[in-house]
Image (spheres, rainbow, N blue to C red):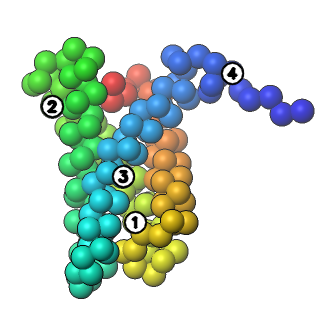
Amino acid sequence: MFQPSLTLIGNVNTPGKKSAHNTKWCLIGCAIGDLGTIFYFQINEIAWPTLNIMILAIINGLITSIILETIILLRQNFSLRQAISTALGMSFISMISMEIAMNVTDVILTGGAMLTWWVVPIMLFVGFITPWPYNYWRLKNYNIACH
């Protein structure tokens, strides 16, 4: 019988659980800007090349992720300066890999910059699973996390 690992779900302070939690918040921040941009272009039927939309979506995803992270850190009693500095110092490798994975998944599955009811969950799953091992590795080996 399958028994879930307590290392991942039982103790909030384990590297697996903490890295998953941090990756989740990064995904939420990135998805707001990324999916919002794609959705805007889709509903307004703006005829831009797919690559341009995806580049703008990645930039907006990075911006919204940094804003969300700053808000989270402010709620943890960071000063505004510390919160912004920490948010900007987060692993861009992680965020960019997440963004690229989500957008490549969208293009492969829909043929362009297009959101459908069935592609969004797949994009989010791929966006989460891509940087999570890296975030886990950073936390486990260097004790470096966003918050």
Dot 3 or dot 4: first in sequence order is 4
Dot 2 or dot 1: first in sequence order is 2
**Quadrant showing the C terminus:** top left
For image coordinates 44% across by 39% down, the residue present is 24
User: Neighbour class for label 1 at 10 Å: few (<14), some, many (≥20)?
Assistant: many
Q: Quadrant of residue 41?
A: bottom left
Q: Which numbered marker is on residue 84? A: 2
User: Neighbour class for label 3 at 10 Å: few (<14), some, many (≥20)?
Assistant: many
Residue 28 % position (x, y): 38, 44
Q: Which numbered marker is on residue 6? A: 4
Amino acid tagged 2:
Ile
Circle 2: element type: helix
Residue 58 % position (x, y): 28, 60
Dot 3 or dot 2: first in sequence order is 3
Amino acid tagged 3:
Ala
Q: CA distance from mark 1 to mark 4?
A: 33 Å
Q: CA distance from mark 2 to mark 1?
A: 26 Å
Q: Quadrant of residue 85?
A: top left
For image coordinates 55% across by 66% down, the residue present is 118
Q: Which residue is mark 3?
A: 31
Dot 3 or dot 1: first in sequence order is 3
Confirm or deny contact between disc 2 and disc 1 (CB under 8 A): no
In the picture, measured across the screen, residue 36 lies left or right of residue 110, that is: left
For image coordinates 47% across by 70% down, the residue present is 116
User: Neighbour class for label 4 at 10 Å: few (<14), some, many (≥20)?
Assistant: few
* Residue 87 to residue 37: above or below: above
Q: CA distance from mark 3 to mark 2?
A: 20 Å
Amino acid tagged 4:
Leu
Q: Which residue is mark 1?
A: 103
Circle 1: element type: helix
